[in-house]
Amino acid sequence: MRILGNILWIICGGFISWFSWIIAGCFWCITIVGIPVGFQCFKLASISLNPFGKEAESDGGCVSFVLNVIWFFVSGIELALINFILGCLLCITIVGIPFGKQFFKIAKVSLMPFGTTVRRVHFA
């Protein structure tokens, strides 16, 4: 079921979200100082490409907080807004509600990506 959800996810807007993370990562990697931020974007692009069966946990510290504040004003608002709008559009229909919930999860990660770890959830 998770595989089918991820395939439908890519068709229903997941590719747009993934591509926006990749573009943000490429822009951050232009400078030497931004390379760690760009790698974080590429890591979080994986949850954006196939979110079903993955969970994001936040456990950041002081350095993560400082990076999240900088991120929020430079790239976070745009990425969160894209995912939030796509989530709202998909939640209009009953069939799109599970996909909309995944977009809202990604929008939350888009606001504060540092200190966030993505892990696969195994169902018993």
Image (cartoon, rainbow, N blue to C red):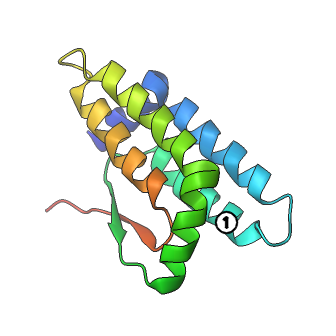
- Residue at point 39%, 34% (across, down): 84
Outermost residue, top direction?
93
Quadrant housing the N terminus: top left
Mark 1 = which residue? Answer: 37
- Left or right of 13 in this view: 90: left
Outermost residue, bottom direction?
62
Q: On the image, which quarter does residue 50 sit in?
A: top left
Q: On the image, which quarter does residue 94 sit in?
A: top left
Relative to residue 66, is residue 71 depicted above or below? Answer: above
Relative to residue 70, is residue 93 depicted above or below? Answer: above
User: Where is residue 113 drawn, in percent x and y?
Assistant: 49, 62
Q: Is residue 76 or residue 92 the one in the foreground?
A: 76
Asked which secondary structure carries label 1, the reply is helix
Q: Which amino acid type is marked by label 1?
A: Val
User: Where is residue 28 drawn, in percent x and y?
Assistant: 75, 57
Outermost residue, right direction?
31
- Is any atom of residue 8 visible in this view? no
Relative to residue 115, is residue 106 depicted above or below? Answer: above
- Left or right of 81 in this view: 3: left
- Left or right of 91 in this view: 118: right
Badge 1, how many Cα within 10 Å: few under 14, some, many 20+?
A: many
Q: Is residue 36 or residue 78 the one in the foreground?
A: 78
- Residue at point 18%, 59% (across, down): 123
User: Where is residue 118 drawn, in percent x and y?
Assistant: 41, 65
- Residue at point 76%, 68% (across, down): 35
Q: Is residue 30 or residue 44 the one in the foreground?
A: 30
Q: So how many labels did they put on this image?
A: 1
User: Where is residue 49 drawn, in percent x and y?
Assistant: 50, 43
- Residue at point 41%, 27% (across, down): 85
Quadrant housing the C terminus: bottom left
- Is any atom of residue 7 visible in this view? yes
